[in-house]
Image (tube, rainbow, N blue to C red):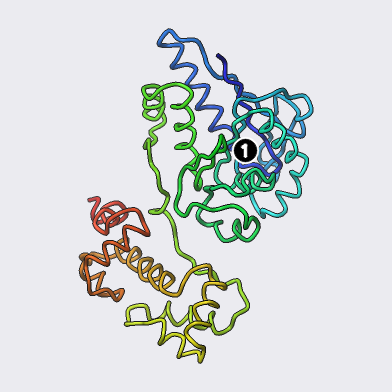
């Protein structure tokens, strides 16, 4: 049975988030036809207007249907938007009840990258898990505290609602959905055609830790700066609290409230971020980097490094160090 796929074209849309999904499902139709099967996907672009101009007039996207003229989709794709998220959401308020209506009629809904902001604005993600671009985690959590962000996640699926991690991670979600709608062989064939690493499950290796400093707690802000300048030393939570003259209990509470992380996790993330930079740019071996960032236990270092990045130290160095590629 034909699958009716709508791709929403919101104001301020990232064009690749529209052209990529359409290209993938159209290509899947071609491959199905080449094996004697009927095309499975009817893909249409839907928007508030017939022409959506994006990126300061550099591109114009023609929609196939207006929101008011559309029927029911089997799958609705919500692509990423560009620029200030609050502004983008304000420009796309008219699409929110339409998205809710599609879900109510039984459509599956998939957000790509920061399209999660639009999807979350509908309320459909409340109480559910969601993936989005790692660089927007804090902003997303601030705007949508009822939604659980999956740290490092590339794909989430819950009750017919899908979401993907940052940027090109959406290709992995599209392949995941394609496999559900067709079969493993078709998904593998399409992944090879587009040169996509199928089954990638984490964006952790791509994440850059930027400690949350958009808060008004001067003692915690001072502590963050101290940690980032002295991460190679033996720092304890008690000593950090004492340094700013706060009780340990109050310090831990305020640190988590201000940064979203415990002090221990924050210190770990700073150390691992420094280790990543060293692996990317130097010829130091694993132990040298480990000692430079303040670890003396190789097992603990490897464990924390893999937990944060999804890769072992050796795998990370081999992937990102130019010298190791020669």
Disc count in the image?
A: 1
Vertical relation: 300 (above or below) 19: below
Image spot of residue 101 (x, y percent)? 72, 33
Relative placement, left or right, of 97 versus 186 is right
Q: Residue furthest top?
A: 36
- Write down the residue under mark 1: 78
Query: Is residue 31 left or right of 325 when viewed as pictured?
Result: right
Numbered disc 1: secondary structure: strand
Name the quadrant of the N terminus.
Answer: top right
Residue at (38% x, 66% y) in the render: 273
- Tell me if 63 is positioned left or right of 219 in this view: right
Which residue is at 74% across, 43% downward? 92
Residue visible at 78% across and 40% down?
Answer: 94
Depth order, front residue of 20/204: 204
Residue 152 lies, in percent from the top left, at: 44, 52
Crowd class of label 1 (few under 14; some 14 to 19; many from 20; radius 10 Å): many
Of residues 160 and 309, the one nearer the viewer is 160
Drawn side of residue 263 relative to residue 254, left or right: left
- Residue 34 drawn at (x, y percent): 42, 11
Q: 1 or 105: which is nearer to us?
A: 105
- Find residue 81 and report its image quarter: top right
Specify the quadrant of the image occupied by residue 61.
top right
- Relative to 295, residue 169 above or below: above
Question: Relative to 34, does residue 120 appear above or below in the rendering?
Answer: below
Residue occupying image coordinates x 38% and y 25%: 184
């Amino acid at each position: 049975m034909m699958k009716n796929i709508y791709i929403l074209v919101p104001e301020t849309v990232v064009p690749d988030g529209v052209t990529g999904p359409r290209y993938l499902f159209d290509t899947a139709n071609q491959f199905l036809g080449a094996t004697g099967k009927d095309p499975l996907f009817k893909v249409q672009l839907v928007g508030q207007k017939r022409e959506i101009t994006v990126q300061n007039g550099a591109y114009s996207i023609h929609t196939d249907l207006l929101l008011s003229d559309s029927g029911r989709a089997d799958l609705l794709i919500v692509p990423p938007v560009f620029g200030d998220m609050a502004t983008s959401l304000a420009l796309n308020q008219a699409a929110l009840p339409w998205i809710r209506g599609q879900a109510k009629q039984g459509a599956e809904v998939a957000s790509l990258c920061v399209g999660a902001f639009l999807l979350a604005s509908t309320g459909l993600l409340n109480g559910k898990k969601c993936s989005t671009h790692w660089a927007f985690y804090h902003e997303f959590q601030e705007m949508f505290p009822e939604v659980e962000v999956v740290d490092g996640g590339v794909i989430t699926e819950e009750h017919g609602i899908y979401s993907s991690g940052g940027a090109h991670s959406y290709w992995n979600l599209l392949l995941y959905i394609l496999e559900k709608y067709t079969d493993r062989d078709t998904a593998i064939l399409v992944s090879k055609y587009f040169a996509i690493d199928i089954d990638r499950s984490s964006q952790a290796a791509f994440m850059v830790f930027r400690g949350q400093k958009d808060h008004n707690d001067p003692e915690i802000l001072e502590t963050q700066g101290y940690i980032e300048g002295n991460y190679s030393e033996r720092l304890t939570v008690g000593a950090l609290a004492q340094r700013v003259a706060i009780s340990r209990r109050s310090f831990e509470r305020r640190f988590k409230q201000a940064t979203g992380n415990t002090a221990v996790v924050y210190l770990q993330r700073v150390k691992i971020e420094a280790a990543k930079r060293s692996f990317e740019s130097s010829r130091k071996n694993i132990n040298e980097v480990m000692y430079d960032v303040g670890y003396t236990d190789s097992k603990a270092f490897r464990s924390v490094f893999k937990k944060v990045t999804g890769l072992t130290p050796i795998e990370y160095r081999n992937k990102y160090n130019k010298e190791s590629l020669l």
